Image (cartoon, coloured by chain):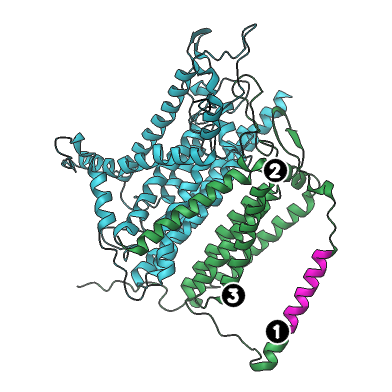
Chain colours: A cyan, B green
Amino acid sequence: MDWLNWHNVSLVLDNPATKWVLLAFGLVMPLASILTWMERRQSAMMQDRLGPNRANIGPIKLKGILHFIADAVKMIFKEDFIPGSVHRGLFALAPVLALAPVLIAFAIIPFGPTVYPHELGNVLHSVPLAGEAPNLTDSIRLQIFQVDFGLIFYFAVLTLANYGGTIAGWASYNKWALLGGLRSSSQMMSYEVSMGLALMGTFLVAGSLEPGYITAHGWNSHYSPANPLNWLWLPQLPGLLLFFVAAVAETKRAPFDIPEGEPEIIGYFVEYSGIRWGMFFLAEFIEIVFISSVITVVFFGGYQVPFLDEDGFRFAGTLAALPHWAVVAMQIGAFGAKVFLLCWFQLLVRWTLPRFRADQLMSLGWKLLLPASLAWIMITALGKLILMSAGG
Amino acid sequence: MSGRVLAAIAALFLVLGLVAAGTAAAQPAGGDAPSVTIQATPGAGVSTASRDIATGSGAGMAILFWALALGTVGGAAFVLTRRNLIAAVMGMVGTFLALAGLYMMLYASFLAVIQMLVYAGAIMVLFVFVIMVLNRPEDEPWGMVGLPGKALAGLAMLYLLVRLVMLVWSVNVPDTALVAPAAVAFPGDAAHTVYEFGSTAAVGTSLFSDYLFPFEAISILLLIAVVGAIAVARPLNDADELPGAQPPAPTGGH
């Protein structure tokens, strides 16, 4: 068992492929699956119904959480019906194009701090004690793809998700699906613009496009990033609101569910059945998780726990020291909790607001969100200019 | 579960696997240099050599290059051979994506994401949109058919090919040009470094210093294009509007 040491373990765990598998199957897929159940239960609670609560494996019931397993089994074994005149290749490609970009975009999300496996049992002092050099030779960075263009990569990949709905509508050879595809395409194009511009203010303030940098430094490197008042939600509150509205529109969910219109107007996936439809469905829920992750990372300090530095809780000058493993576990947990709360909030929005009309949707995007985001960039830039000239 | 569904799922995982391998290998040699080096935790001695799998061997980069080159050429060939316009557009998206990967290997990382965002994303979505709305392409206004037309087209293509090959052969790349660009400290923040070439900071610095005038001139040109498009698209007065563009007034008395 000579090979089983921290060096080799961190080599394996630091591999982007390993990290992607762990992130996708450990956090994203389970959360998205639970959300499919949670959405129905939450809507039921809000409408004074019971909702799905009966799926069970023998005596194990868990208030119906097992419904997502039943759903998955049903979708996989359901007949995969393909209408006669569809374009076969594009019909098969569309669900992949809807699902793959969202999963790829998770590469830039930092879901925890950098882990130093040799120091897991020790306190990682911010100023190393005399005679005790921490062993930092191996490290596991809990972010798959750390690049200086960070969040632009997200926008670049998510424009590809646009093809999913559009191609599905076109390949189905169905007038209603085609119209749904056009609605989806125009809506996603319109709101992508506001989405990007709404985050520009945060880039200006943070001085970087890299989500890990924004998380680890807060918006001002002189302040502790662990203080919730130093997170970007406070100085960038209008940017947060603009981004949230545009992002909900981008997920194509109520009140912006015109492309799908499941109950009555029929959307782009009307000809899809079985697991192919399931891929569109899963993509929508993964998008909810992803947008929550982006908002968490940019506006709510990512994995930062309030007042928890890398050596323990630091409050009013006193330090309650904690070992490295506890800090790491709490920070990963904090990231998951923040993402979960934001997912819950998006479900709440869906079951609270009625649907927009198509023309209202377009005028909201182009006549309100776009000018407002441009104005907010100008205001942020002006504020930064004043602060910079005052500071030096 | 039918074979086609299995094939679709397999295709999804193939795409994801390629991207995972790509993110592993696309970070060029030199460890974390192209990325922002984060020092949230004490001790700068974070080992970066082990971060990227393809750094040690040139074979990984070579395989990646050939895969991307095949993707570029294969996508273009797909565009030429498709009768179905939307399928052709998807081939073009593939070409643009593979090209973005090649840019990434050349350390032009900002250019690579902009290529994905603008070409593979925005412009090709507009292509799809226009094709879906128009649904049928116009016939060529004029064209030479038969053998003379083919011969002319073949000669023109041959000439273009010869000139391109001559150009490529004439470029002499010294070995010093193959070294990765150096990492420089980010202006105003010594704690993290970026590449002096191709990174967001480098592109931004040159756009707003050396090339400020062309940059501003192009933005005014684009503004003129936007204003022009709106002017062309909107009717001059209400009488010009197409009949039926307005919904018929409710007549009442149902």
**Disc 3 to disc 2, C-alpha distance:** 34 Å
Q: Magenta region: which residues?
A: B155-169
Q: Which residue sits at x=64%, y=19%?
A: B43
Residue tagged by mark 2?
Answer: B199
Q: Which residue sits at x=53%, y=72%?
A: B235
Badge 1: residue crowd in 10 Å (few <14, some 14–19, many ≥20): few
Q: Which residue sits at x=53%, y=7%?
A: A317
Q: Is residue B12 magenta?
A: no
**Disc 3 to disc 1, C-alpha distance:** 14 Å
> Of the residues shown, which amino acid type is indicated by label 1?
Ala
* Residue closer to the observer: A170 or A141: A141
Instruction: Provide the secondary structure element on which disc 2 rests.
Output: loop
Please determine whether, in this image, residue B9 is positioned above or below residue A347.
below
Instruction: Provide the secondary structure element on which disc 1 rests.
Output: helix
Mark nearer the viewer, 2 or 1? 1
Residue tagged by mark 3?
Answer: B80
The reply to whether discs 2 and 1 touch (Cβ–Cβ < 8 Å) is no
Mark number for residue A225?
A: none
Please determine whether, in this image, residue A385 is positioned above or below residue B78.
above
> Of the residues shown, which amino acid type is indicated by label 2?
Ser
Residue tagged by mark 1?
Answer: B153
Figure quadrant of the N terminus of chain B: bottom left
Q: Which sits earlier in the primary sequence, circle 2 or circle 1?
A: 1
Q: Which residue sits at x=37%, y=59%?
A: B6
> Of the residues shown, which amino acid type is indicated by label 3?
Leu
